[in-house]
Each structure stands twice: as C-alpha cells, then as structure tokens.
Image: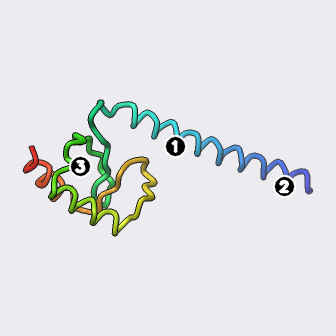
Amino acid sequence: MKTGNRFVGIAHAKQKLQRTLSQRIKMASAVADVPKGHLAVYVGENHKRFVIPISYLSHPLFRDLLDWAEEEFGFNHPMGGLTIPCTEDYFISLTSSLN
C-alpha cells in the first residue's frame, strides 16, 4: 500500500509543478508584450491588466495612487505586475487626465 501512496504523491507533485511552470510561462509571456517604456499594472477586484507609460510614475496624482497601493498590498504582487486597489473606472479616469 505504501508504494501506491508514493505514486499518488509523485503524481500530485508533478501536477503542482506543471501548474507552477504554466503560471510562470503565462507571466513571462505577459511581460514580453509590454512595450519598451511601459509598465503592466493590475487594477480593481478582477485585476484587469493595463499597460501604461513609465512616465506616469513621476506624476504626483499617480504617485498618490501608488502610495495607497503600497499601504494596501505592500510590495508582494502575485500577478507579476503592480496591483492597484482602485476601481477600473477611477483608474481610467485618472490615467485619462494624465494624457
């Protein structure tokens, strides 16, 4: 019986490794489609992805939003990009005013 459990454990470990590698491949391909001079951010409850110019990072309004994101999430961003805890509508409104 121990041998059967061992194979089940190996099968589960293999599945977990495949999921992990699959997620990393998706994240790498997401990073690859960000043009030079831009940054991917994830916004709202559904973590919708936006690609924004890096120049936004120096704008005072955007920096306030980043400070809020830091307080909310810290520096751990499981999506592979910056996570911002505001609504999509607010983010679109803010970035539209920065253009």
Judged from the image, the secondary structure of the residue bearing numbered disc 3 is helix
Q: Secondary structure at mark 2?
A: helix
Front label number (2 vs 1):
1
- Label whose residue precedes the other's in the sequence (2 or 3): 2
- Give the SS element for disc 1: helix
Amino acid tagged 2: Asn
What percent of the width, then of the height, locates residue 75? 42, 59
Residue 57 numbered mark, or none: 3
- In this rendering, the label closer to the viewer, 2 or 3: 3
Q: Which mark is residue 23?
A: 1
- For the C terminus, give its image quadrant: top left
Q: Residue at x 10, y 48 (%)?
A: 98
Residue highlighted by disc 2: 5
Amino acid bearing label 3: Leu
- The percent coordinates of residue 12 (x first, y second) are 71, 50
Which tag, 2 or 1, sits closer to the chain's start? 2
> How many angstroms separate mark 2 from mark 3 (CA)?
52 Å
- Do residues under tags 1 and 3 come within 8 Å of each other at their CB atoms? no
Taking depth in this image into account, of 83 and 64 the one nearest to the observer is 64
Q: Is residue 36 above or below residue 55?
A: above
Residue sitting at x 19%, y 47%: 56
